Each structure stands twice: as C-alpha cells, then as structure tokens.
Image (cartoon, rainbow, N blue to C red):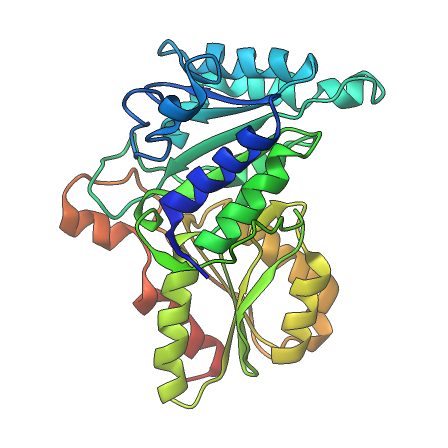
Amino acid sequence: MPELSYREAVRDALSHAMREDDDVFIMGEDIAEMGGSMGVTAGMLDEFGPDRVRNTPISEMAIVGAGIGAAIQGMRPVVEVMYEDFTTLAMEQIVNQAAKHRSMSGGQLKVPLTIRTQGGAGWSPGAQHAQQLEGWFVHVPGLKVVFASTPTDVRGLLWSAIYDDNPVMFFEHRTLYGIKEEVPDDLEPIPIGKARVHREGEDVTVVATGRLVHEALAAAQEAEGEGVSVEVFDPRTLQPLDEDGLVASVKKTNRCVVAHEAVTRMGFGAEIAAVVQEKAFDWLDAPIERVGAKFAPLPFAPVMEDYVVPDAADVLEAIRRTVGR
C-alpha cells in the first residue's frame, strides 16, 4: 500500500477522475501554474492542459456560477474556493442556485458540482482566512457536506462527491495537508453518509470532525491511561449524517462529547447533541459535552489563537467531566 499525504490524496482523486472521464475538469484561483495556494493541484496543468485545469478571475461568485452552469449542461466540474472564508462571496450562487435547481425542476436538472475549499487555524492566518463555516451549509437543503480527516477518507469521499448528481461542499483543513498514511493501491469510493469509527471504546463517545478527530484520538490515548475507554466517531459527511451509526455508538457508551474547531455557538455539534438527545436520551448517563472554539474572531497572535481554538486538552477535560473525574 503506498503512503500518501492528505494533499496527495486529494490530487490523486482529482487526477483519477480526470483520466477516466473527460467531463471532469477543475477551476479556481491560481490552480494551474501555481498549483493552488496549498499546492494541491501542482503538476496537473502539465498532464491535463489549460482547458481542464482552468485559472479563474478573483471572483468567487463567478467561479461557482460557472461551475453551476457547466454542471447543469452535463459536465462534472470541481471548483476550488481558495479559503472557505471566501465562500461568503458566493453564497447567492451556492445557497439560492446550486442547492435549489434539482428540486425546483422536479428532478429534471442535475447539478453534479463539487466545491472544494479549505480553512482552519493552527498557522496564524488571522480572522479572515481560517474560519470553520461548515455548519452554515449543513443548514441548506439541497447541499451535501463532506469534511474528511484522513488521506484515505479524503480520497474516497472526493471521488464520491465528483460522481454525485447533487452539489457537494467539500471541506479540507489546512493543517491536515501534510499528514500521511498508507492507502489502498486502488482508489476505493467511500459512500457519502457513512461515518467512521477511528477507535473503539466503552465509556464515552467523542464525535469529532476535521482536525479535532486527531485531537480526540490524542485525548483518548491520555484518557486510556486514566482508565477511561473512549470511542472516537468521525461523521466524515455532515449532510447526510449517519444518524444510525451515531446513535448506536452512544447507546454503547452511554456518554457523548462533541468536538469541532468551529465556534461552539450554533456549531455543527449542536445538531449532533440534538440528534443524540432525540434518539438516545434514555441511554445517556451524563449530559452531552460540547467542545469548540471560543466565540471570537480568530486572533492573529499565536498565543491568542491557541487560547481561542480547542485542542486535545480541551477534549480530555470534556471526557473527564462526562465520566465524573
């Protein structure tokens, strides 16, 4: 099994799809010669040429709008929004157009559009280049939302996103691009809507997304030394959500901690907590704990960034609270 970084796994999925299907193409700001701001598409221009690896003007509304048009006409475009903060500039196209066409046409139109974007703290980017806004898009009917945390998952889920006939918001985290793991030789699609249990446990379920999956695994290792068995549950796809898998995990452990990098207020964790309360309340032995960023714009100074953004220590404290330690 080859070892791929998260960055290479994204590139591998894109390249596989483009080699096998002429309807797949990519476009975004500086993705061609420069290879994108994070180097994800480096080298793809040489293989596929400028017709299929397209630089665009600095206009997120135009990028997404062109993608919607191409998707409706039968292509399978993958558009890159350089930072997820900049999806704010394309909200009309994403929310009022991409998400609505299939339903409003009675299924006559398909919108097989994948919108890749990245964000996240951990490298002092400041308040306008690191927000975690995935919860916004889970709230919009008609969109699917993916947030993969490992190279294997990002490769398999991106393939599935490209071949979904609905628009997919595909979130990546800046600090995960360098992590590596062995992945299968053959690209294996991963169903959208199926969660992954990274670690089995008996005492508490930690539901984590993105970078916080790795922080949760570190916290689980620490908790094991204190005699607490932690299950780490990664939804992977936020919409549709694997509710059956989530509820089964909580019914097994009887406790739940939700952890994400986005601010806690109105974050995706609130929806997780609601689902658990509605479907597994009688199995809970303690209140649900939530871990997220403090309600503040992300500071630029590293020490302040660390103060605002949650880490493994915050997850561990929530685990201790829910088990009464």
Whether residue 293 is situated above or below residue 107 in the rendered picture: below
Of residues 91 and 113, the one nearer the viewer is 113
Residue 35 in picture, x, y percent from top left? 32, 27
Of residues 233 and 110, the one nearer the viewer is 110
**Residue 316 visible at all:** no
Of residues 283 and 146, the one nearer the viewer is 146
**Residue 70 visible at all:** yes
Whether residue 11 is situated above or below residue 181 in the rendered picture: above
Q: Residue at x 32, y 27 (%)?
A: 36
Q: Residue at x 39, y 49 (%)?
A: 6
Q: Quick one: which residue is furthest to the bottom in this view?
A: 227
Image quadrant containing the C terminus: bottom left
- Residue 286, picture quadrant: bottom right
- Residue 44, picture quadrant: top left
User: Image check: 41 left or right of 158?
Assistant: left
User: Image check: 163 left or right of 158?
Assistant: right
Residue 54 in picture, x, y percent from top left? 43, 15
Residue 52 in picture, x, y percent from top left? 48, 18
- Residue 123, picture quadrant: top left
How many numbered dots are placed on residues in this image? 0
Residue 309 in picture, x, y percent from top left? 30, 52
